[in-house]
Image: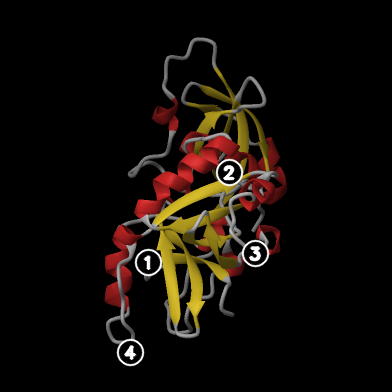
Amino acid sequence: MAVGTVRYALYASSSGELISDLTVWQIGPETIDIMSGRAADVREITAALVTYDVNVFDLSDQTAALALQGPATNACLQELVDRGEVAEIPSFGFRELGIVGKHCIVGRLGFTGLDGVEILCTPDDASRLWQLLAQMSRPAGFMAADMLRLTAGLPLFSQEFAPPVTAADVGLSRIWKPFASTTEFREPQVARVLFRARWASDTTTALPDVLWTDGGAFPPPVNTVAVTSICNNPTAADLIGMGYVSLKNKSNQLSDTAGLLSNIQLIKIFGEQPP
């Protein structure tokens, strides 16, 4: 990796089942930052590197992250940058920039499916930067990001990696390069799909109740979906979700999969990823 670039990576168990995902930032010729949304990764990565000639530091308490996403990102942030062009930061690249006198690292990435950046700064500076950005953009919580990433068909590790799935199951095998000594991984058993659904008229079931939970059937039975994410569709009077269908069906028949997801009636599957 060249200095100033970011790489998306997968963290898997010895049997190939996905645990979390990471971004790796090449800060200097011999320095990388690894970012994860799973706190246990710090301990496990440190243990995995114990035999290497490297020093490992946990920067969690020294780092805050703000995300600015959407088509007006560059214009909005540029008004606060002391010098340098935000628009010149490439996809999966980053630059060190001064923002109203605060030292920040600005990376062109995010998981909403929209153009945007992640801004790394100190916790002491985060509050001031949030106040300034909130005056120029619309503050939003995780629910908004979750709706956008589902619309874009992007997996979230805490949801889509909850069942025992491999990179091939999730559709991310193109970035999974296991070491030659790693044990053989199983062939894909499921395909990750997006779906639209509507409530049954008499339902009283809450959305979390339809999600796949540990111990549930997996791979899912034919003509059913193991739901890993679901939320209200902000652009229509239905629901949007993500889950897995069994590859016991032929790949060209995935769009015909239908059935009752608890009290939710499936109306459409799209974005299927055949093996």
Label 2: how many Cα within 10 Å (few below 14, some 14–19, many 20+): some
Q: Earlier in the sequence, mark 3 or mark 4?
A: 4
* Quadrant of the rendering where the N terminus is positioned: bottom right
- Per the image, the residue denoted by label 1 is 13
Q: Which mark is residue 53?
A: 4
Name the residue located 58 percent from the left edge and 61 percent from the top edge: 172
Image side of residue 44 versus residue 229, left or right: left
Name the residue located 47 percent from the left edge and 81 percent from the top edge: 179
Q: Amino acid at mark 3?
A: Gly
Q: Nearer the viewer, mark 2 or mark 3?
A: 3
Please report contact status of discs 3 and 1: CB closer than 8 Å, yes or no.
Answer: no
Instruction: Describe the element under mark 2 as helix, strand or loop.
Output: helix
Q: Nearer the viewer, mark 3 or mark 1?
A: 3
Where 198 sits versus 22, above or below? above
What is the distance, in whole Å, between disc 2 and disc 3 at their CAs?
29 Å
Viewer-closest of 96 and 142? 96
Figure label count: 4
Instruction: Describe the element under mark 4 as helix, strand or loop.
Output: loop
Q: Residue furthest bottom?
A: 53
- Per the image, the residue denoted by label 2 is 149
What is the distance, in whole Å, between disc 3 and disc 1 at their CAs?
41 Å
- Per the image, the residue denoted by label 3 is 84
